[in-house]
Image (cartoon, helix red, strand yellow):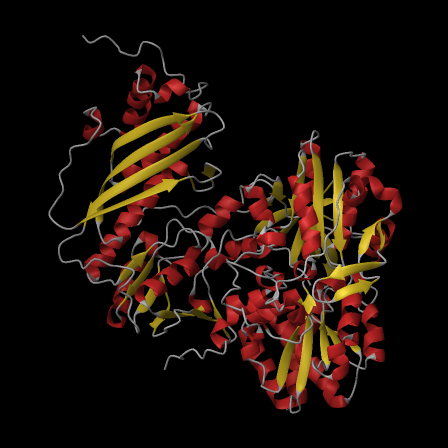
């Protein structure tokens, strides 16, 4: 419900912190709410914390669905 | 920006709009629960793209909007105490409390208020100001609650004695209960045929908590992302469920939401908070088991335990329709002071001052649709 | 040979501003001579008078003043000094005039490091030299520690409108006119925010702080009757257009897709929950001209280094409500309202 953005993990640091990047802008966020994070993962960031990982496969699937919906409708 | 731009594709949006037009042949009233969704609908002008058969009813999912004035006043009292630094999100700073005093106004009058971007910063302020008492004004639905939990646990781990939390975290299912169980829903004053379920709240709690609503109230619920494509697709999914007579929970936001949610975050919240028996919600009245407070063993970090904070309920301004707007009974433009006595510059209620509030969204983005018909250019 | 009036060296490297620097006595004279006048280095200042004696060519005179209180003082792409020069040079240029002279007033806080002051003054001098607009007179005051934020600067600029140019004005926008900008929106504000404590985000975005009078000169030479020229500083593009809408009694219809915004600025604004159309610019201008002049004006702007990314972003409309409307890339429409108060970052 709140403002949260997808960002890519660029580096991991001590103290459950990570540097994430969105559109060339880098920010340090807490990854204390995630089980495992790797550099290269995409996460949803809210008020300085990563809430969950983003699944690129599911994202692709969502977009692909939109193409199929049109076929189903016609 | 990956995961954002693809979901803002104008061509895809037009396609979805065309499909909606073709399939939404009945009449549909859907509530988007979450303020972030209301904001997105207005910011991208999505309501212009929906067929006239689909109406959106705006829900109460805006933590700033549902915070009672009395609680804001308590935060202001904290900020006025000598030696206290109140750390708050920007969203709360301009909300008018009793006598129209906001945190910003209180600061101008001498209260110590610091705007922060997250609970982590409050930790930093506490460490850097050992001689001050730092209080973090914690608000938010389940999206934000775990972030406060992390900070509380960290404070406990470090043994900080100068940091406490003024907790106002509220629960989404309770608000949905209140809407579905409301007088207006029962007697048909408002009509909600389905819900756009909160997106980021669901990354934490998962989509499972909505299943009982879909089943018992027989309304479809689609958990949606925040980008325009997400919203349009979710609305289409709701239309399809209604057309087929289905009432299930579907997840459109699969890239970020799974049925069970974020277990680690949920566990941390369970370790840190417990349910309040009841809590006053602006607009929705007093709801049972709808809000959180710190667990007893963390009382050292509970601002309500640490400080003398009497509570006085404050009624909304009589002309303010926030309550009815939050329950979906009125639209902002139905409020008699919308745009006149109540504007973002001089807000009478939280729906106007919160960027997620329906009134603010309408005023900022959609005033040209207000009853006073604007001229269209040729 | 004249005795050196200032036998004690000015401790620029480690010294601090003291109250005596503002009292009009020897300490102040030394600061003015050895720091300010030495940096700004022009015959007017060298006279050593309180007032500057100036010659102005024929034509209407434009004067503008601005005070600069930016924090932090030093930011990517500039500092309070260069900003103070560019800001006022631009304001004069927006009046349709060629900026000729600047004044600079400093309010210094006791304890402010002289090394920082030197850095700022050198930066101002550099900006003034590059713009070809000298700082010909100035003033210095010092306030007690705690009563100022390091340094506040006021600059006033004077210029003359070239013959044949019709003075632009905020009240001159007419329905049907075309709206142009010379480049990307939001750079300056984001550069500033990236340095604000507590925000902890890093970006390569630099302030766009720059002098625009050269560009404006070219524009007015090609189109002597530009209706409106204004730089969207505080409050950004949206607020500035609302001001003009109000002054001219018109509305605007903009195309979201046509407004240039750098991807990093977009991303930073997303992260902060603010709208780039409300973020300050310091090297950008809005030009509103008759429809027949638009293409020519665009061409001239793009040919200039300060206008490479110039774009037509919309038109002026008849609108008694004065709405600034934006067509979103979905064909939806929304209003761009005034900015009210500070733009506070959202969590929700």
Q: Is residue A54 left or right of residue C5?
A: right
Q: Is residue B231 left or right of residue C288?
A: right
Q: Position of residue C237 (x, y in %)?
A: 41, 58
Q: Position of residue C270 (x, y in %)?
A: 57, 57
Nearer the observer, B60 or C272: B60
Nearer the observer, C17 or A36: C17
Q: Quadrant of the C terminus of chain B?
A: bottom left
Residue B170, compared with residue B79, is above or below; it is: below
Residue C298 appears in which quarter of the rendering? bottom left
Q: Is residue C239 left or right of residue A56?
A: left
Residue A37 seen from this side = no
Nearer the observer, C284 or B53: B53
Q: Quadrant of the N terminus of chain B?
A: bottom right
Which residue does the image show at 43% across and 24% down from the upper left? Answer: C115
Residue C16 appears in which quarter of the rendering? top left
Residue at far right of view? B297
Q: Position of residue B281 (x, y in %)?
A: 73, 62
Residue C57, compared with residue B370, is above or below; it is: above
Residue C289, compared with residue C278, is above or below; it is: below
Residue B153 appears in which quarter of the rendering? top right
Which residue does the image show at 57% across and 69% down from the upper left? Answer: B8
Q: Position of residue C3 (x, y in %)?
A: 23, 8
């Amino acid at each position: 419900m709140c403002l949260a953005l997808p960002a890519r993990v660029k580096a991991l640091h001590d103290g459950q912190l990570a540097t994430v990047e969105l559109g060339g802008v880098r920010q340090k966020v807490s990854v204390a709410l995630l089980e495992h994070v790797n550099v290269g993962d995409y996460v949803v960031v809210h008020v300085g914390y990563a809430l969950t990982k983003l699944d690129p496969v599911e994202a692709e699937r969502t977009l692909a669905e939109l193409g199929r919906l049109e076929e189903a409708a016609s | 920006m990956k995961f954002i731009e693809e979901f803002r594709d104008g061509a895809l949006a037009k396609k979805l709009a065309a499909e909606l037009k073709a399939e939404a042949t009945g009449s549909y009233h859907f509530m988007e629960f979450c303020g972030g969704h209301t904001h997105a609908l207005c910011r991208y002008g999505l309501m212009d793209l929906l067929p006239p058969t689909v109406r959106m009813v705006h829900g109460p999912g805006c933590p700033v909007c549902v915070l009672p004035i009395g609680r804001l006043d308590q935060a202001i009292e904290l900020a006025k105490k000598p030696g206290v630094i109140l750390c708050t999100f920007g969203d709360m700073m301009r909300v008018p409390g009793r006598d129209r005093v906001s945190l910003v106004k209180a600061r101008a009058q001498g209260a110590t208020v610091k705007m922060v971007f997250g609970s982590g910063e409050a930790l930093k302020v506490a460490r850097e100001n050992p001689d001050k008492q730092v209080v973090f004004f914690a608000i938010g639905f389940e999206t934000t609650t775990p972030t406060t939990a992390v900070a509380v646990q960290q404070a406990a781990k470090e043994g900080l004695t100068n940091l406490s939390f003024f907790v106002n975290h509220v629960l989404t299912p309770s608000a949905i209960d209140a809407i579905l169980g409301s007088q207006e829903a029962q007697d048909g004053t408002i009509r909600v045929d389905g819900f756009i379920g909160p997106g980021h709240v669901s990354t934490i709690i998962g989509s499972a908590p909505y299943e009982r609503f879909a089943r018992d109230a027989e309304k479809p619920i689609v958990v949606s992302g925040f980008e325009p494509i997400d919203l349009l697709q979710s609305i289409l999914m709701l239309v399809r469920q209604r057309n087929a007579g289905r009432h299930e929970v579907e997840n459109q936001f699969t890239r970020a939401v799974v049925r069970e949610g974020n277990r680690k975050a949920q566990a941390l919240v369970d370790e840190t908070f417990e349910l309040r028996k009841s809590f006053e919600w602006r607009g929705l009245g007093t709801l049972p088991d709808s809000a959180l407070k710190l667990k007893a063993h963390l009382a050292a970090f509970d601002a309500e335990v640490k400080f003398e904070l009497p509570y006085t309920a404050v009624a909304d301004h009589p002309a303010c329709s926030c309550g009815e707007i939050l329950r979906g009974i009125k639209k902002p433009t139905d409020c008699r002071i919308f745009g006149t006595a109540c504007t973002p510059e001089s807000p009478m209620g939280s729906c106007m001052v919160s960027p997620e509030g329906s009134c603010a969204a309408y005023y900022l983005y959609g005033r040209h649709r207000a009853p006073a018909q604007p001229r269209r250019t040729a | 040979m004249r005795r050196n009036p200032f036998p004690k060296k000015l401790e620029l490297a480690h010294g601090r501003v003291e109250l005596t620097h503002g009292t009009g006595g020897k300490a102040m004279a030394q600061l003015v001579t050895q720091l300010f006048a030495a940096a700004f280095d022009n015959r007017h200042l060298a006279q050593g008078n309180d007032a500057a004696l100036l010659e102005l060519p024929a034509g209407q005179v434009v004067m503008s003043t601005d005070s600069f209180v930016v924090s932090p003082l030093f930011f990517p792409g500039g500092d309070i000094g260069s900003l103070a020069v560019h800001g006022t040079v631009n304001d004069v240029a927006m009046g349709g005039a060629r900026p000729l002279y600047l004044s600079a007033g400093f309010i210094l806080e006791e304890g402010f490091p002289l090394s920082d002051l030197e850095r700022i003054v050198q930066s101002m001098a550099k900006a003034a030299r590059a713009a070809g607009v000298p700082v010909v007179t100035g003033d210095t005051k010092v306030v007690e520690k705690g009563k100022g934020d390091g340094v506040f600067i006021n600059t006033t600029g004077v210029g003359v409108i070239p013959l044949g140019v019709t003075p632009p004005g905020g009240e001159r926008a007419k329905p049907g006119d075309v709206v142009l900008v010379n480049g990307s929106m939001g750079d300056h504000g984001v550069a500033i925010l990236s340095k604000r404590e507590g925000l902890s985000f890093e970006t390569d975005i630099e302030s766009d702080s720059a002098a625009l009078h050269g560009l404006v000169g070219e524009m007015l030479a090609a189109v002597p009757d530009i209706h409106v020229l204004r730089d969207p500083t505080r409050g950004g593009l949206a607020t500035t257009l609302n001001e003009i809408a109000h002054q001219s009694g018109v509305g605007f219809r903009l195309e979201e897709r046509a407004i240039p915004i750098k991807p990093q600025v977009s991303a930073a604004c997303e992260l902060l929950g603010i709208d780039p159309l409300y973020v300050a610019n310091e090297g950008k201008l809005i030009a509103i001209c008759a429809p027949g002049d638009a293409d020519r004006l665009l061409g001239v702007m793009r040919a200039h280094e300060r206008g490479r990314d110039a774009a037509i972003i919309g038109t002026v409309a008849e609108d008694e409500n004065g709405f600034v409307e934006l067509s979103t890339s979905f064909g939806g429409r929304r209003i761009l309202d005034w900015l009210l108060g500070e733009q506070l970052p959202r969590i929700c």
